[in-house]
Amino acid sequence: MTEASVAAIAELVSGTLHGDGERRIVGLADLRNAQPDRIGFVRHQSYYAAAKDTKAGALLVAEQIPTGASLIVVPDVDVAYAKVAALFHPTPRASEHRVHPTAVVHPEAQIEGPVEIGPHAVIGRCRIGPGCVVMAGVTIGDDCTLGADCVLYPRVTLYHAVTLGNRVICHASSVIGSDGFGFAREGSTYLKVPQLGTVVIEDDVEIGAGTMIDRATLGVTMVHARTKLDNLVHIAHNCTIGYDVVMAGGAMVAGSTSIGDRCVVAGRVGIAGHLKICADTRLGGGSVVIRDIDQPGDYMGHPLTSMRRHMRLLQKLREMVDE
Amino acid sequence: MTEASVAAIAELVSGTLHGDGERRIVGLADLRNAQPDRIGFVRHQSYYAAAKDTKAGALLVAEQIPTGASLIVVPDVDVAYAKVAALFHPTPRASEHRVHPTAVVHPEAQIEGPVEIGPHAVIGRCRIGPGCVVMAGVTIGDDCTLGADCVLYPRVTLYHAVTLGNRVICHASSVIGSDGFGFAREGSTYLKVPQLGTVVIEDDVEIGAGTMIDRATLGVTMVHARTKLDNLVHIAHNCTIGYDVVMAGGAMVAGSTSIGDRCVVAGRVGIAGHLKICADTRLGGGSVVIRDIDQPGDYMGHPLTSMRRHMRLLQKLREMVDE
Amino acid sequence: MTEASVAAIAELVSGTLHGDGERRIVGLADLRNAQPDRIGFVRHQSYYAAAKDTKAGALLVAEQIPTGASLIVVPDVDVAYAKVAALFHPTPRASEHRVHPTAVVHPEAQIEGPVEIGPHAVIGRCRIGPGCVVMAGVTIGDDCTLGADCVLYPRVTLYHAVTLGNRVICHASSVIGSDGFGFAREGSTYLKVPQLGTVVIEDDVEIGAGTMIDRATLGVTMVHARTKLDNLVHIAHNCTIGYDVVMAGGAMVAGSTSIGDRCVVAGRVGIAGHLKICADTRLGGGSVVIRDIDQPGDYMGHPLTSMRRHMRLLQKLREMVDE
């Protein structure tokens, strides 16, 4: 069990300590059911009453408040909470080398140092970095490369020659490196265009359950570092997704489109192929994007307009059918 | 093979028997290719001619019609058909205990009575109730609880500490308990917020193929009893889905939203986060919901309006570009 | 390694050879990094400069251009490229019989050698034609039939009694034959209607990763020959998808709808149930289809109109909120 002093936690979150820094904390707590060896958090003033009476040993809070708990005052409680929660509930990481006897591992797979490979995993002639956790039923194709500390939840499939950076998390049933949807039309039928490229997923990317990322026709489908994809997202062949992008559930990007850094794509947004979406674009839920976006900002709808205009358009459309 | 008398079937469906109740029925039949030991059903008058000449031993029908078959007259043929079809084609249920030798079962798993566990399933330190059928390649995490008579089709993944009630059906490749999509923004990057809650799926829920239900950040993502989710549905963290809800293919609900009892959500509807959708709301296909709904009724579109207004809006929009 | 003369390649693509036909070609090349035993392709005039200086032994090109390479002039470079790429990078096909020892194969399965069955596959009492490649963790239910040369990527699930024709490709995590979403409403709750039909996938169909195709209530859910489905597509029970149809990522079709031959359905299109979409219909991205379509053409939007009108409607809506 992880244990830390209140002072150490204050340092972890760059907070200001008020009260006893020596208390030992072993986990998180709900304010109302807390024990003295737990730390709680106070996001809103509505919790001040509960905070006053809590038995928690420490609290993360945005300002000093009356309570018997030690206080760690931070500018952003959410950020501090994320760090403290990750301290006590870290992402899985292999500390000792364990390969389940039912896993099928290619004899030439290069597995460096402690890696956990779960039951019925199938590991091709690939490279896996230290600390990786490969859970039950994961398939990793030949010529894949996984950096350090990746976590592949059950039933993830990596086709051949996919590259994951460090600390990449792939949730269950996600698929990386499936064939791009490429066909050449000959008369009224379609010929499959072999998909000879690959996929690169950079450091600290998280990929949601049931999310599908296709390999490039030639070249690379790229997901840059620290980007987070939710469940049931579809990234088509030859896309480039920038750094620190967030894409929510069901968002889909057609082939060869690039999404700039720090874009936020809400749920069920569809983005057509061969577009360029500039950095710092935020797209509201359900939007349909069929043109390039070259100005950062908040957009929504179909037609895609600024968020403010979109809300006015909705209002005008409502008025058209008011009774 | 299941066998029942016409009289017993009439009782099962609370129907009125006309004709011979002693006939033995062993299965369903198409009217035109029926045998005397089969039961057919007549949904519309257009089938009355075929019903007259059928060789089926019995018919489910809404009113008395001329035929040589015994008749079971019921107020709702669809409901009666569902019951009779389920009699002859019941949902799979384990009657004897069978664990495939290739399954990996935690030695401390508590498995009560007859359970079928298929090849390559991976069963953690969990509890599984009697009658459950766990098919090939299913993964069940530690601390999960399954009630009686659940059916998990191939390649379902339950993360740790997920609870299923009785008679829950999960179709292939569905995932329950994956991390909610929760991040705290620090500068231009995102910190993962550990998802420490869980998922509760109550009795008689059916979950479609490739449907994803995320665990709560803290607390519970809840799907109440008898709700039916179609394929490729996404339920985000901390949602509450009411009793007897129906959600069709590709419907998606963002975080912390609650859907009231008996709602009907059509295909590809997107519902934003932190909303309350009241009971008995019906949402038409492709709707985008960005506000609470506090009046039951039929809604559709974006802007979301009553179904009637939405149809008028579509007409007005068409007229705007008529030639 | 596949090897072919330039003349043989010219014949394969029905092209006109200019230059040395005896050169031996062993693979594809990028124009700039080519070796003399490689073939490149020139899609646009913008590559003519690179083509002039290339070291590739041969080029696929739409007209004669100055270069030291042998030329194969073809009317459609994309089609010729697809054929040549497939020559050097063919779809996987079993040439020798190999069943991985961890696969679980029903003793009565009829497997007409040579077939490759990967680790942890689970094969019911089914028929599998010669040349099929069944990868890791695939599940094939009882009474399924697979024609020749099918490829099932990892973790595909076929429920029982599904039929695949010849050369069908199913990408990872796709599911075929899951229960249709059929319920009979009794009061405020729903009774499951057993789904007793099946799914037929004809020759040369390709099914994307995470795509779900439900079995029929009674009868057949049909996907006709040569149709291509992208990732995360949902085909509900009792649909009929015509010949040579293309459906892009996230497209969804509700129950009992038929899609005519040669239709093109773009990404995230939703099509309601019980509709008929005529042959040669093309639907733009994100469209919502709630009526039959009986005239071929290009349509988009919601309301669904001709592509041209839809673009005008978007413009008019933008003008309504211009500032």
Image (spheres, coloured by chain):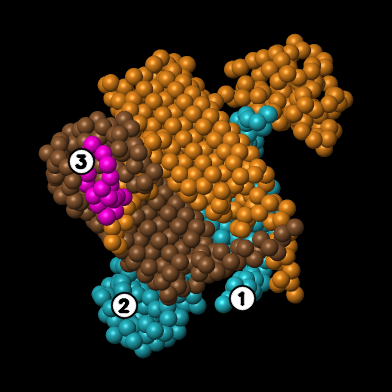
Chain colours: A orange, B cyan, C brown
Q: Is residue C63 magenta?
A: yes
Are labels 1 and 2 on one chain? Answer: yes
Q: Is residue A11 visible?
A: yes
Which mark, residue B319? Answer: 1
Q: Residue at x 56, y 32 (%)?
A: A243
**Vertical placement of B261 versus B38: above or below?**
above
Horizontal side of residue B317 vs C169, given as left or right: right
Are labels 3 and 2 on one chain? Answer: no
Chain letter for mark 3, please.
C
Q: Along the polypeptide, which appears first: circle 1 or circle 2?
A: 2
Report how far apart the C-alphas of labels 1 and 2 lie in the structure.
47 Å
**Vertical placement of C210 versus B23: above or below?**
above
**Vertical placement of C180 versus A158: above or below?**
below
Between B86 and B45, the one nearer to me in the picture: B45
In the picture of the structure, the residue carrying the numbered disc 3 is C70
> For the residue labelled by badge 2, is the local secondary structure a helix, a strand or a loop?
helix
Report how far apart the C-alphas of labels 3 and 2 lie in the structure.
67 Å
Spot occupied by residue A48 in the image (x, y as percentages of width and height): 84, 32
Q: Amino acid at mark 3?
A: Ser
> For the residue labelled by badge 1, is the local secondary structure a helix, a strand or a loop?
helix
Task: Specify few, some or many for label 2: CA neighbours under 10 Å numbering under 14, 14-19, or 20 or more.
Answer: many
Q: Is residue B81 magenta?
A: no
Q: Amino acid at mark 1?
A: Glu
Q: Quadrant of the N terminus of chain A?
A: top right
Q: Nearer the viewer, mark 3 or mark 2?
A: 3
User: What span is in magenta?
Assistant: C61-82
